[in-house]
Image (tube, rainbow, N blue to C red):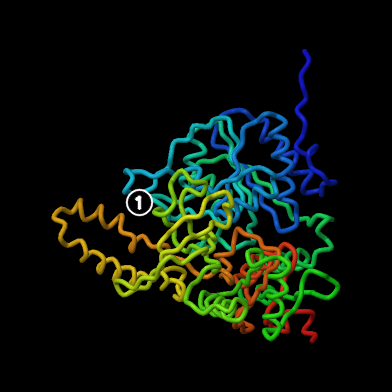
């Protein structure tokens, strides 16, 4: 009997693989050839520069050649865009793929939709961002993702991510990258591989060299005895000899930003800082000094959506809804409104990460632009809700009033912040050619594993140029001036 030998994914990898990668290809081949049904998950964990994206690109080519069905997904629109670029295949957000609007046209509720795809490989990037705590709909995103994929037990799930990056807000680990969580809480059979060796093609990069050192310091700090000297990371950036990483004082920021905007454009440049307060300050400085902005908001402003919104986009659009983390550009301010103790603007918007989507018109909640919280504060949201509620006091039934409130344009106003400067959690999942990182106020006892993880995540957002802005001199080039 003649049997056809199935080629390895390795055959589609464009470089000589590292030892880690060679072992990974053997594991992947076995995982992909296993056709028996079951909740089977492959974790591909890897540090920056170790070739995760090149491996996934090779895997996609292999799947195409083998005629296998697959789906690419990521937690945010920006992460899906990055995934599409490196794989050469369209990727969608997890939310767009697995949720649908439920309860009729006036409902704001979303529910997991049925999965009609069997014998399909679901590939999910930036899995460190996926939470197993309830925050979307009635259940956690990780619960719904696994429930959706394994509705058909012939499906397979490949989760890709970097355990050194920040975990989901409020969590100490990234549950979607933890084999123990997936096995015990979700009854999955988990196979895992970790890439640690930086590819030779990345060795000339100062960004990746410094990211690797940060990752090693983080690992040592995590493995050390609490309270010991080893538990305190020894962070030392090296900029000398590298053309892609620079130390910069605040007095040079305006010149640096003008250079980056000229070379890359403001959509491909960002500042990453420690707090919303710092981000607000940078955003106002940039608007005032670089764009000569005079009004609170105007055409050309670059914004980030900071709370999921299901009102202003049709469900059948490519994005599905306006998600927390989506970037939009104001193309026109239609009118400004002061009502219910808040400021609003009706504006035309362009979806930055969905270039094929037509412009949309939405009502913006301007107060969010200046809050030091991640979104509109709960007490002010409650006050707005109560004020709007009085407008519907004439409605006689609870059902009528509830329907009117759900459709109210003020309560459904889009919560946004300026997006020239972002916190690290807001930037996670995206990459920019030019990134300025400001670690903010820093005392020696604040240099711990948590800070190192923050710094690693911030640094690895840069793909071409990294600027260390106002960095503590002791952290860069051995303290040399």
Q: Is residue 237 visible?
A: yes
- Against 79, is 416 above or below? below
Determine whether the residue tagged by mark 1 lies in a helix, strand or loop.
Answer: loop
Q: Nearer the viewer, residue 415 or 469?
A: 415
Give the quarter of the figure containing the N terminus. top right
Residue 61's image quarter? top right
Residue 107 location in percent, x, y? 32, 48
Badge 1: few (under 14), some or many (20 or more) residues near its Cα, within 10 Å? some
> In the displayed structure, does residue 204 sit left or right of residue 56?
right
Name which residue lies at 45% across and 73% down. 373
Q: Nearer the viewer, residue 244 or 360?
A: 360
Q: Nearer the viewer, residue 98 or 267?
A: 267
Name the residue beneath numbered marker 1: 108
Residue sitting at the far top: 1
Give the quarter of the figure containing the C terminus. bottom right
Residue 254's image quarter? bottom right
Residue 247 location in percent, x, y? 75, 78
> In the displayed structure, does residue 116 sit left or right of residue 78?
left
Residue 59 location in percent, x, y? 71, 40
- Against 197, is 59 above or below? above
Q: Is residue 224 visible?
A: no
Q: Nearer the viewer, residue 228 or 260?
A: 260
């Amino acid at each position: 009997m003649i049997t056809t030998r199935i080629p390895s994914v390795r055959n589609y990898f464009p470089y000589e693989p590292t030892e880690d990668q060679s072992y990974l290809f053997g594991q992947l081949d076995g995982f992909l050839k296993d056709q028996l049904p079951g909740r089977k998950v492959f974790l591909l964990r890897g540090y920056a520069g170790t070739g995760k994206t090149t491996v996934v690109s090779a895997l996609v080519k292999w799947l195409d050649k083998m005629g296998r069905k697959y789906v690419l997904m990521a937690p945010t629109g920006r992460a899906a865009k990055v995934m599409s670029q490196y794989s050469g295949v369209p990727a969608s957000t997890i939310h767009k793929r697995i949720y649908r609007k439920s309860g009729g046209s006036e409902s704001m509720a979303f529910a997991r939709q049925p999965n009609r795809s069997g014998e399909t490989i679901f590939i999910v990037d930036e899995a460190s961002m996926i939470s197993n705590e309830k925050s979307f709909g009635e259940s956690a995103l990780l619960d719904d993702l696994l429930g959706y994929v394994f509705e058909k037990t012939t499906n397979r799930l490949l989760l890709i991510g970097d355990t050194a990056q920040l975990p989901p807000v409020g969590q100490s680990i990234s549950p979607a990258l933890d084999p123990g969580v997936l096995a015990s809480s979700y009854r999955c059979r988990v196979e895992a591989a970790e890439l640690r060796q930086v590819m030779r093609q990345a060795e000339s990069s100062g960004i990746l060299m410094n990211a690797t050192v940060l990752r090693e310091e983080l690992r040592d700090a995590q493995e050390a005895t609490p309270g010991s000297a080893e538990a305190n990371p020894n962070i030392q950036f090296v900029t000398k000899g590298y053309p892609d990483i620079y130390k910069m004082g605040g007095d040079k920021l305006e010149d640096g930003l003008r250079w980056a905007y000229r070379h890359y454009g403001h959509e491909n440049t960002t500042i990453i800082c420690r707090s919303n307060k710092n981000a607000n300050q940078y955003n106002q400085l940039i608007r005032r000094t670089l764009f000569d902005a005079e009004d609170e908001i105007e055409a050309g402003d670059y914004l980030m959506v900071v709370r999921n919104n299901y009102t202003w986009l049709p469900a059948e659009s490519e994005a599905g809804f306006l998600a927390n983390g989506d970037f939009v550009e104001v193309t026109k301010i239609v009118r400004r409104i002061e009502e219910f103790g808040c400021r609003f603007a009706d504006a035309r918007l362009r979806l930055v990460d969905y270039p094929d989507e037509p412009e949309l018109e939405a009502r913006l909640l301007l107060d969010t632009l200046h809050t030091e919280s991640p979104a509109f504060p709960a007490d002010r949201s409650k006050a707005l809700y109560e004020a709007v509620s009085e407008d519907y006091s004439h409605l006689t039934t609870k059902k009528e009033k509830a329907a009117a409130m759900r459709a109210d344009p003020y309560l459904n106003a889009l919560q946004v912040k300026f997006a020239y400067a972002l916190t690290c959690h807001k930037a996670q999942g995206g990459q920019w050619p030019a990134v300025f990182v400001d670690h903010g106020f820093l005392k020696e006892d604040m240099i711990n594993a948590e800070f190192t993880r923050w710094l690693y995540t911030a640094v690895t957002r840069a793909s071409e140029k990294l600027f260390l802005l106002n960095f503590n001199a002791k952290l860069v080039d051995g303290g040399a001036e």
